[in-house]
Image (cartoon, grey):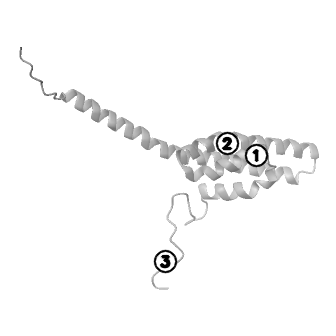
Protein backbone atom coordinates (compact mmCIF):
# COMPACT_ATOMS: atom_id res chain seq x y z
CA UNK A 1 0.00 0.00 0.00
CA UNK A 2 1.46 3.20 -1.15
CA UNK A 3 0.17 6.15 0.85
CA UNK A 4 1.65 9.02 -1.01
CA UNK A 5 -0.16 12.30 -0.89
CA UNK A 6 -0.49 13.71 -4.31
CA UNK A 7 0.23 17.39 -4.64
CA UNK A 8 -2.84 19.38 -5.70
CA UNK A 9 -2.23 21.35 -8.86
CA UNK A 10 -5.06 23.54 -10.07
CA UNK A 11 -5.92 23.10 -13.67
CA UNK A 12 -5.62 25.87 -16.17
CA UNK A 13 -9.39 25.94 -16.57
CA UNK A 14 -9.98 26.72 -12.89
CA UNK A 15 -7.41 29.52 -13.06
CA UNK A 16 -9.16 31.13 -16.04
CA UNK A 17 -12.54 30.66 -14.38
CA UNK A 18 -11.27 32.42 -11.25
CA UNK A 19 -9.80 35.28 -13.31
CA UNK A 20 -13.08 35.67 -15.18
CA UNK A 21 -14.99 35.75 -11.90
CA UNK A 22 -12.71 38.51 -10.58
CA UNK A 23 -13.14 40.54 -13.75
CA UNK A 24 -16.94 40.26 -13.72
CA UNK A 25 -17.16 41.20 -10.03
CA UNK A 26 -14.90 44.21 -10.65
CA UNK A 27 -17.09 45.43 -13.51
CA UNK A 28 -20.23 44.91 -11.44
CA UNK A 29 -18.88 46.75 -8.41
CA UNK A 30 -17.51 49.65 -10.44
CA UNK A 31 -20.89 50.19 -12.06
CA UNK A 32 -22.47 50.94 -8.67
CA UNK A 33 -20.66 54.25 -8.25
CA UNK A 34 -21.63 55.53 -11.67
CA UNK A 35 -25.30 54.75 -11.11
CA UNK A 36 -25.29 56.74 -7.85
CA UNK A 37 -24.56 59.97 -9.69
CA UNK A 38 -27.12 59.22 -12.37
CA UNK A 39 -29.80 58.45 -9.79
CA UNK A 40 -28.99 61.60 -7.83
CA UNK A 41 -29.23 63.68 -11.01
CA UNK A 42 -32.60 62.12 -11.86
CA UNK A 43 -33.82 62.78 -8.32
CA UNK A 44 -32.70 66.40 -8.54
CA UNK A 45 -34.43 66.79 -11.90
CA UNK A 46 -37.67 65.69 -10.25
CA UNK A 47 -36.98 67.94 -7.25
CA UNK A 48 -36.38 70.95 -9.51
CA UNK A 49 -39.68 70.29 -11.32
CA UNK A 50 -41.40 69.98 -7.94
CA UNK A 51 -39.94 73.26 -6.71
CA UNK A 52 -41.04 75.02 -9.91
CA UNK A 53 -44.56 73.63 -9.46
CA UNK A 54 -44.53 74.74 -5.82
CA UNK A 55 -43.43 78.27 -6.75
CA UNK A 56 -46.24 78.44 -9.30
CA UNK A 57 -48.70 77.27 -6.63
CA UNK A 58 -47.60 79.98 -4.21
CA UNK A 59 -48.45 82.78 -6.67
CA UNK A 60 -51.64 81.19 -7.96
CA UNK A 61 -54.70 83.39 -7.35
CA UNK A 62 -57.21 80.51 -7.35
CA UNK A 63 -57.01 78.70 -3.97
CA UNK A 64 -58.30 75.42 -5.41
CA UNK A 65 -55.69 75.42 -8.17
CA UNK A 66 -53.01 76.42 -5.67
CA UNK A 67 -53.88 73.48 -3.39
CA UNK A 68 -53.88 71.12 -6.37
CA UNK A 69 -50.45 72.37 -7.53
CA UNK A 70 -49.01 72.05 -4.00
CA UNK A 71 -50.27 68.46 -3.78
CA UNK A 72 -48.72 67.71 -7.18
CA UNK A 73 -45.39 69.23 -6.06
CA UNK A 74 -45.42 67.14 -2.87
CA UNK A 75 -46.13 63.98 -4.87
CA UNK A 76 -43.19 64.78 -7.11
CA UNK A 77 -40.91 65.19 -4.07
CA UNK A 78 -42.00 61.82 -2.74
CA UNK A 79 -41.38 60.24 -6.15
CA UNK A 80 -37.78 61.51 -6.03
CA UNK A 81 -37.10 59.81 -2.69
CA UNK A 82 -36.47 56.26 -4.02
CA UNK A 83 -33.88 57.54 -6.50
CA UNK A 84 -32.15 59.56 -3.78
CA UNK A 85 -32.17 56.53 -1.48
CA UNK A 86 -30.52 54.37 -4.13
CA UNK A 87 -27.93 57.08 -4.79
CA UNK A 88 -27.13 57.54 -1.10
CA UNK A 89 -26.84 53.79 -0.64
CA UNK A 90 -24.06 53.69 -3.22
CA UNK A 91 -22.44 57.02 -2.39
CA UNK A 92 -22.82 58.69 1.00
CA UNK A 93 -22.31 62.14 -0.51
CA UNK A 94 -25.98 62.05 -1.50
CA UNK A 95 -27.17 61.28 2.05
CA UNK A 96 -28.27 64.88 2.70
CA UNK A 97 -30.60 64.85 -0.31
CA UNK A 98 -32.18 61.59 0.83
CA UNK A 99 -32.61 62.85 4.38
CA UNK A 100 -34.23 66.09 3.26
CA UNK A 101 -36.60 64.30 0.90
CA UNK A 102 -37.57 61.84 3.62
CA UNK A 103 -38.69 64.80 5.75
CA UNK A 104 -41.39 65.64 3.19
CA UNK A 105 -43.77 63.35 5.09
CA UNK A 106 -43.52 65.46 8.24
CA UNK A 107 -42.42 68.95 7.20
CA UNK A 108 -44.25 71.36 4.86
CA UNK A 109 -42.54 71.84 1.51
CA UNK A 110 -42.04 75.57 2.11
CA UNK A 111 -39.55 74.66 4.87
CA UNK A 112 -37.63 72.28 2.58
CA UNK A 113 -37.25 74.60 -0.41
CA UNK A 114 -33.92 76.19 0.61
CA UNK A 115 -32.26 72.89 1.58
CA UNK A 116 -33.42 71.09 -1.55
CA UNK A 117 -32.34 73.98 -3.76
CA UNK A 118 -28.82 74.00 -2.29
CA UNK A 119 -28.42 70.23 -2.35
CA UNK A 120 -29.53 69.93 -5.96
CA UNK A 121 -27.38 72.90 -6.95
CA UNK A 122 -24.35 70.86 -5.87
CA UNK A 123 -25.51 67.76 -7.74
CA UNK A 124 -26.55 69.61 -10.91
CA UNK A 125 -23.95 72.40 -11.21
CA UNK A 126 -24.99 75.27 -13.42
CA UNK A 127 -22.07 77.66 -13.08
CA UNK A 128 -18.57 76.94 -14.38
CA UNK A 129 -16.19 76.03 -11.60
CA UNK A 130 -19.01 75.24 -9.19
CA UNK A 131 -18.21 72.61 -6.58
CA UNK A 132 -19.60 69.15 -7.27
CA UNK A 133 -19.71 66.18 -4.86
CA UNK A 134 -16.34 64.48 -4.68
CA UNK A 135 -14.52 67.50 -6.11
CA UNK A 136 -11.36 68.96 -4.59
CA UNK A 137 -11.74 71.92 -2.28
CA UNK A 138 -8.40 73.40 -1.17
CA UNK A 139 -8.03 74.20 2.55
CA UNK A 140 -8.47 77.83 3.54
CA UNK A 141 -4.82 78.24 4.50
CA UNK A 142 -3.53 77.13 1.07
CA UNK A 143 -3.27 79.81 -1.61
CA UNK A 144 -4.56 78.54 -4.92
CA UNK A 145 -2.74 81.19 -6.96
CA UNK A 146 0.90 81.48 -5.77
CA UNK A 147 1.31 84.99 -7.26
CA UNK A 148 -1.09 86.48 -4.70
How many marks do you count on the picture? 3
Q: Which mark is residue 142?
A: 3
Q: Is residue 66 left or right of residue 15?
A: right
Mark 3 burial class by Cα count in 10 Å: few <14, some 14-19, many 20+: few
Residue 67 is situated, as x and y percent measured from the top left of the image, at 88, 44
Q: Secondary structure at mark 2?
A: helix
Q: Which residue is mark 1?
A: 104
Instruction: Tell which circle, 3 or 2, labels the residue nearer the N-terminal end.
Output: 2
Q: Which residue is mark 2?
A: 81
Residue 136 is situated, as x and y percent measured from the top left of the image, at 49, 65
Q: Is residue 141 above or below residue 33?
A: below
Q: Is residue 71 left or right of residue 22?
A: right
Q: Are marks 2 and 1 in contact (CB under 8 Å)?
A: yes
Instruction: Tell which circle, 2 or 1, labels the residue nearer the N-terminal end.
Output: 2
Q: Is residue 42 left or right of residue 33?
A: right
Instruction: Tell which circle, 3 or 1, labels the residue nearer the N-terminal end.
Output: 1
Q: Is residue 15 above or below residue 129?
A: above
Mark 1 burial class by Cα count in 10 Å: few <14, some 14-19, many 20+: some
Mark 2 burial class by Cα count in 10 Å: few <14, some 14-19, many 20+: many
Q: Secondary structure at mark 3?
A: loop
Q: Is residue 5 left or right of residue 75?
A: left
Front-lying residue, 9 or 56: 9
Determine the residue positioned at 83% across, 45% down.
70
**Residue 124 seen by the camera:** no
Front-lying residue, 32 or 107: 107
Image quadrant containing the N terminus: top left
Amino acid sequence: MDRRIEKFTPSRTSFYLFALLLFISGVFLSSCGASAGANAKKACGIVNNSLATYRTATIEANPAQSAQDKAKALTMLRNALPLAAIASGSNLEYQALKATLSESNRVPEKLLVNALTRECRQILPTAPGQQVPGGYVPPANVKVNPSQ
